[in-house]
Amino acid sequence: MKTPRKNVGSVSFTCPKCGRSHSRTLWAEATEFYADTGKPTSEGYGFVRTEVVVCPCGAQLIAADDCENVNIYWINRPKEGG
């Protein structure tokens, strides 16, 4: 069963590898549920993020909220030095 989520806005950012612009929906995932129904509580939404963005240049990116800012994370970034 998929974790319930709700739309909490959107974010625009550029790819750190090629500079291409992307715009995605921010989703909040349910983290607290009512014991009797199993449905999410109205305040029970936490972790805010986008789906993984696969840029045409090959970079895999995700935008996520760290409770202060929305940051862009490059998932498949090559390791420096080899």
Image (tube, grey):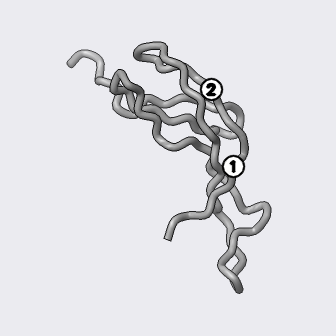
Q: Residue 37, image x and y in percent?
A: 69, 83
Q: Which residue is mark 1?
A: 7
- The percent coordinates of residue 4 (x first, y second) are 61, 63
Image quadrant where one finds the C terminus = top left
The extreme right residue here reads: 42
Q: Residue 13: image x %, image y %?
A: 58, 23
> Could you tell whether 71 is left or right of 19 in the image?
right
**Which residue is painted at 62% across and 50% down in the image?**
47
Residue under the point 24% across and 15% down: 81
Circle 2 crowding by C-alpha within 10 Å: few under 14, some 14–19, many from 20 = few
Q: CA distance from mark 1 to mark 2?
A: 15 Å
Q: Could you tell me the amino acid type at mark 2?
A: Ser
Give residue 70's quadrant in the image.
Answer: top right
User: Are the residues flagged by discs 1 and 2 in contact, CB closer than 8 Å?
Assistant: no
Residue type at tag 1: Asn
> Vertical placement of 8 versus 1: above or below?
above
Q: Which is more toward the observer, 52 or 65?
A: 52
**Relative to residue 44, is residue 54 depicted above or below?**
above
Residue positioned 64% across, 42% down in the render: 26
Instruction: State the residue at coordinates (58%, 38%).
Output: 64
Looking at this view, name the residue that lies furthest to the bottom. 36
> In the image, is residue 12 above or below residue 7?
above
Name the element at disc 2.
strand
Q: Nearer the viewer, residue 67 or 33?
A: 33
Q: Earlier in the sequence, mark 1 or mark 2?
A: 1
How many numbered circles does the render carry? 2
Q: Residue furthest left?
A: 82
Q: Which residue is mark 2?
A: 12
Q: Residues within 10 Å of mark 1 (few under 14, many from 20)?
A: few
In the rendered image, residue 7, in percent from the top left (x then y), is placed at: 69, 49
- Indicate which disc residue 19 carries: none
